[in-house]
Image (cartoon, rainbow, N blue to C red):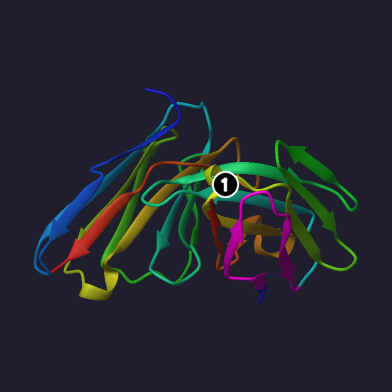
Amino acid sequence: ETGVTQTPRHLVMGMTNKKSLKCEQHLGHNAMYWYKQSAKKPLELMFVYNFKEQTENNSVPSRFSPECPNSSHLFLHLHTLQPEDSALYLCASSQVEGYEQYFGPGTRLTVT
Amino acid sequence: ELKVEQNPLFLSMQEGKNYTIYCNYSTTSDRLYWYRQDPGKSLESLFVLLSNGAVKQEGRLMASLDTKARLSTLHITAAVHDLSATYFCAVDMETSGSRLTFGEGTQLTVNP
């Protein structure tokens, strides 16, 4: 595997479910990011981790819970989501925070 | 609050024609990025512009940055169908601790 990978690529979940999105980067980077891309809206930064430490929480509701166990892996734990949370969730990484970001393929999430 | 505005948001052009996409931003920034996104795919980095007057070219695309005017342009020369995609500019605002703020994207369709 090369670059930034995300699993699953597609996810359908009910509002009472708990699921997790996974991101892995194979670039030796130290910063990782979660973005949300909704239809007809700009990409929204959700969370930033730099050297495993969370450095940004962009007023994200608590039903989204990030986890960064090491510099290569980033998770987004989801619980009791709302239909408006349906979107494409993109993970990105960079050498360190502030450098050029490389994006994964995204997880298309549908909340029913 | 940093605002990044792209125009046009939708662009339909014929093959062989030239056109320019504009990206305006509201506060001082040292770095500007252009990304391409194909439908259902992730973001692909096209250009990184790091200083006033920077110009970069790759194939039929040329990007420039004027930090004094807070303006970047993405010029398309002799468009081909393969350039059909959504193009995003993203600005790195120093005061936000190096966070990317994205424009809404320009959806480009090149018709035969």
Task: Find the magenta span and give its range.
Answer: B4-26
The chain that hosts pointer 1 is B
**Could you say which is closer to the camera, residue A107 or residue A74?**
A107
Q: A111 left or right of A43?
A: left
Q: B12 left or right of B18?
A: left
Q: A86 left or right of B62?
A: left
Residue at 50% x, 40% y is: A93
Question: Residue A108 in magenta?
Answer: no
Task: Give the crowd class for mark 1: few <14, some 14-19, many >=20 residues within 10 Å.
Answer: some
**Could you say which is closer to the camera, residue A56 or residue B7?**
B7
Taking the image as drawn, is residue A104 in sight?
yes
Question: Could you tell me which quadrant the N terminus of chain A lies in?
Answer: top left
| Image position, residue A82 (x, y; %) | 21, 74
| Image position, residue B23 (x, y; %) | 71, 65
Residue at 58% x, 70% y is: B9
In the picture of the structure, the residue carrying the numbered disc 1 is B83
Q: A24 left or right of B105?
A: left
Question: Residue B18 in magenta?
Answer: yes
Question: Could you tell me which quadrant the C terminus of chain A lies in?
Answer: bottom left
Quadrant of the image occupied by residue B56: top right
